[in-house]
Image (tube, coloured by chain):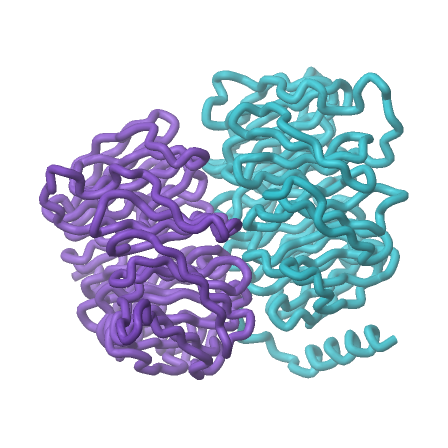
Chain colours: A cyan, B purple
């Protein structure tokens, strides 16, 4: 109740102001409230909410990217909704339904093009970041008349976007240097890529495979070499363990030249050398990992888990090579977001209807924010990074 | 003249507004105009100036850090001046003279403490980022009654700062977890450290040595091991080549597991493996390098030079391992700053009184901004990074 009251008070204060805020945008963020189609806007310095906005549609699996000035959030909903939110005025600037069934989006290196990836109809669509006018689209027609679901969309340098075709078994890279006439290159990748990521420097695109073991890797600096398979044992393996949730590849982390990634179906985090892309170690954890996320300095890696272990968090010390902290911060931990310089981390506890904030140095609870079934948490510092 | 007029018009427009801007701060920046004690504020999306502020004192070798919301710039002047600038209102919020002779500063991980490093009196001072109230100081008294110049100050995780004592030959790490009672650890480093840097992840502190060859390195994750010497041939060497300007260590870059660093006195950029800290290659360039800066994705490394080659820029392709672009963008190129996602780079041409902006993909000139003997260029995206 106390939590709820402080939330109401913060919102009232915000509403009283009436005029848009003159303030910096570097320390703002947005929490997805998946059950109610709302988002809560937060200040990461005061660690308080300052606005709540409804009417964003189906926000299950929603994700967010930011304009390069940090003022506008682009929220991609599951129902094909694309909503532009003004973080300073705390209101929706524009909202369109751009497809029937969507799964996230991205923003170009120059900040001028917002791209959505769609299941139905399969493909990607590019919109003007200012007006949300449709600029162009790339249907994922991998064979005549056959369209694929698109997954794993990521921006890469040169106003390009890389993504994978689940049904088509390919990685595509589309160059939007001319936003109305994108040029696409296709690379065979493997059976049923189900998610993808680009390394933090924007060089390597990796797609996890659902239909076979292994990961498809495309070196974006040398695309003429095509995609190749790495980590040939990565996946469900021969034993076909029960997999409660395929891990998010976007939850992979690279720290100190090593990638930390969730094992599929096993209670382990895998360590892979980024120079050779070979596995060099495994760390036991308390469940099937979903997100495996490094603190920005790479010293810690935080791990959350699939049901039934989704109330737990394990923290790995990358120097010690083992779990050094075990926590139960709330029920249904779905996502985590670090402050850009890593001093604290925000965790969404969906089934406790709150977001909890921890100090990463001493694991002290710094605060909590009421939210209605919170899922993704997205800070404006993402505007300055490659590969979202 | 045309450049000058467009500048005047931009300033008039800005002045007409009269009220502070409601706008994002993620795409703002500040250009130091060293000769006139002024700064020009710029918008990196429109690539235009929007305000000019005078009265900042001696700005030779000035540097800037930002509050975590991106609204406030802290400008450290050569004369010990510390000036807090409001990037939205385009005005000085507060200005103090905190020492007689200073050489830059930094801001803590949590954004609450601004620290200046001083030559006279030698030491560091910590200020409240909100009020600029003095919180504490650490005199660099390395032996009874002997005070050292402080160089190479950098913020590191845990609200700590690492820095080097030129006269004392030591690296110090001060923990400001309690801002009024910092706790300092001392590490012998070598003869006359003259500059320092922390790697982008905040783990390794490196100090270049003026009095001997080699670089002192302290692993901040394992400070009990003390500082050790790496790159034993790095420096002026036996031949004592004429060195026109000691290169900025802050200009080192780490990309793809390799560090690119300016050779001292030689027309070369050295490549060092960050895993072993051994030299693995050299790339010939057209002068004595000063700044060797990687584009954020690490594909390119841009190099500027000491007099008499300070009108030149060489661009190294890190995949090809050689210079792929040679430019003469203006006279007296002192500094460069990349857009946070690397799509363009801003270069200050001091002796041409302008800042030039290039597209890093095709090396096209995108624009130029008039400025009075510009030196440092600092974008607000620095607020989100470790080690400045």
Q: Nearer the viewer, residue B142 or B104?
A: B142
Q: Residue at x 82, y 31 (%)?
A: A265
**Taking A225 as reference, is B290 left or right?**
left
- Which image quarter holds the N terminus of chain A? bottom right
- The answer to whether residue A135 is visible is yes
Q: Position of residue B374 (x, y in %)?
A: 23, 61
Would you say B132 lies left or right of B332 here?
A: right
Number of numbered callouts drawn: 0
Q: Going 68% across and 65% down the picture, which residue do you hit? A: A41
Q: Quadrant of residue B168?
A: bottom left
Q: Quadrant of the C terminus of chain A?
A: top right
Residue B256 placement (x, y as % from top left): 45, 34
Camera-side residue of A341 and B170: B170
* Residue B76 visible to the viewer: no
Q: Nearer the viewer, residue B133 or B55?
A: B133
Q: Where is residue B350 shown, x and y percent of the image? A: 18, 58
Q: Going by the image, does A214 lie left or right of B146?
A: right
Where B359 falls versus B387 (above or below)? Answer: above
Residue at the front extreme? B144
Q: Is residue B37 left or right of residue A125?
A: left
Percent across and percent down for residue B194 are 26, 56
């Amino acid at each position: 109740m106390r939590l709820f009251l402080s939330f109401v008070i913060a919102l009232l204060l915000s509403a009283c102001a009436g005029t848009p805020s003159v303030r910096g945008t570097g320390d703002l963020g947005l929490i997805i409230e998946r059950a109610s189609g709302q988002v809560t806007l937060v200040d990461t310095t005061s660690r308080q909410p300052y606005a709540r906005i409804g009417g964003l549609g189906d926000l299950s699996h929603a994700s967010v990217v930011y304009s390069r000035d940090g003022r506008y959030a682009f929220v991609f909903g599951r129902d094909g909704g694309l909503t532009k939110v003004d973080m300073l005025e705390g209101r929706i600037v524009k909202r369109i339904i751009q497809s029937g069934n969507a799964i996230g989006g991205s923003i170009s290196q120059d900040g001028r093009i917002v791209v959505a990836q769609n299941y139905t109809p399969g493909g990607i669509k590019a919109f003007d970041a200012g007006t949300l006018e449709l600029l162009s689209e790339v249907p994922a027609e991998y064979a005549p008349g056959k369209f694929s679901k698109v997954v794993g969309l990521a921006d890469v340098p040169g106003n390009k976007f890389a993504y994978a075709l689940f049904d088509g078994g390919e990685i595509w890279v589309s160059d939007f240097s001319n936003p109305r006439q994108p040029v696409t290159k296709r690379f065979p990748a493997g059976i049923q890529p189900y998610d993808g990521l680009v390394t933090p420097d924007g060089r390597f695109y990796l797609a996890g495979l659902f239909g076979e073991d292994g990961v498809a890797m495309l070196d974006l600096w040398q695309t003429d070499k095509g995609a190749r398979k790495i980590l040939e044992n990565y996946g469900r393996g021969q034993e076909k363990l029960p997999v409660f949730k395929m891990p998010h590849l976007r939850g992979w982390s690279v720290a100190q030249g090593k990638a930390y990634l969730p094992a599929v179906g096993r209670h382990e985090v895998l360590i892979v050398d980024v120079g050779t892309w070979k596995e060099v170690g495994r760390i036991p954890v308390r469940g099937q990992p979903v997100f495996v996320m490094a603190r920005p300095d790479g010293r810690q890696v935080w791990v959350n888990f699939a049901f039934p272990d989704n109330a737990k968090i394990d923290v790995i010390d990358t120097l010690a090579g083992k779990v050094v902290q075990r926590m139960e911060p709330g029920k249904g931990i779905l996502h985590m977001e670090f402050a850009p310089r890593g001093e604290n981390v925000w965790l969404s506890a969906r089934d406790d209807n709150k977001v909890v904030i921890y100090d990463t140095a001493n694991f002290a609870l710094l605060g909590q924010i009421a939210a209605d079934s919170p899922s993704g948490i997205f800070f404006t510092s993402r505007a300055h990074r490659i590969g979202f």
